Image: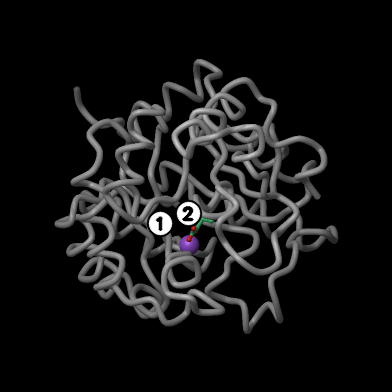
Amino acid sequence: TRRRTHVDLAKMRADGEKIAMLTCYDASFAQLCDTADVDVLLIGDSLGMVLQGRDSTLAVTLADVAYHTACVVRGSHRPMIIADMPFGSFQESPQQALRNAVPLVASGAQMVKIEGGAEMAETTRFLSSRGIPVCGHVGLTPQSVHQIGGYRVQGRDNSGAVRLLADALAQQEAGATLIVLEAIPEALAAEVTSSLAIPTIGIGASRECSGQVLVLHDMLDISTGRKARFVRNFMAGETTIAGAIVAYVAAVKNGSFPGPEHCY
Ligand code: KIV
Ligand code: NA
């Protein structure tokens, strides 16, 4: 067996098969996700919140993400591995981004995810033309929480929607082969998905996205604090964590998650 790649994800989109993605941070959960046939594991900087107990992702370091990436890689064989580039590790320049992507790739990441749209297109072009596949991330970008003024739905008004579509197109044009759409209106997520050729991964977006992602601890209902609208507790009706992850994959694949109650 070999790991899935972005080429496999493109084929899944073309074939109409939904992509099931979860965040993951350690070998034990990675093994459960592998067994449940999760397509993609994201070592998200959400680890700052769910593992480290912080109230934002801003203090997560490159070393943190590299460490957890190596743990997830050791626990799995089949899912594609994507690592988040943390705040401050890529915004300065394409060169800085490449230098800091290297330890993540060395830890086993097959792709790095950077938050941003058109303003990060040059960086996406630089990384992808030098052998590092890039996942874009538009909509609610938690590393910009202070600039946004809180964790809130993006692209609600017409100018915001136009800008978001342009950002997603700029990422694709720059060479991104995957893009996360976070916390945007359902209709906008559907429009972005149909306007792009690359797969879209939604979180608080739309069932029309090419795939879905949730934070593992949220969907297992073991994270504390206020839960976002887009989270579904997959432990409901299950007796094991393994069962909950299997239920998530099934719900993404058959299109029953997300429902309208998880969207904006
Ligand atoms: O850090 C993270 O978990 C993420 C996903 C929610 C997309 O970026
Ligand atoms: Na993230």
Q: Is residue 238 left or right of residue 96?
A: right
Q: Is residue 194 left or right of residue 71?
A: right
**Is residue 122 positioned above or below 18 on the image?**
below
SS label for mark 1:
strand
Front residue (pair 216, 158): 216
**Is residue 164 positioned above or below 211 on the image?**
below
Residue 113, disc: 1
Query: Which residue does the image show at 31% across and 47% down from the upper left?
Result: 133
SS label for mark 2:
strand
Residue 257, disc: none
Name the spot of residue 122 as percent of width and height, x first. Answer: 40, 64
Front residue (pair 39, 209): 39
Q: In the figure, residue 38 lies in which quadrant? A: top left
Q: In the figure, residue 105 lies in which quadrant? A: bottom left
Q: Residue furthest left?
A: 106
Front residue (pair 233, 40): 233
The residue carrying pointer 1 sits among few (fewer than 14), some (14 to 19) or many (20 or more) residues within 10 Å by Cα, namely: many
Residue 136, disc: 2
Name the spot of residue 222 as percent of width and height, x first. Answer: 55, 57
Query: Which residue does the image show at 54% across and 77% down from the upper left?
Result: 56
Mark 1 C-beta to ligand 1 under 8 Å: yes
Q: Amino acid at mark 1?
A: Lys
Q: Earlier in the sequence, mark 2 or mark 1?
A: 1
Query: Which residue does the image show at 85% across and 61% down from the upper left?
Result: 157
Name the spot of residue 37 as percent of width and height, x first. Answer: 39, 27
Task: Determine whether label 2 and label 1 are within 8 Å by CB.
Answer: yes
Name the spot of residue 138 as percent of width and height, x first. Answer: 58, 58
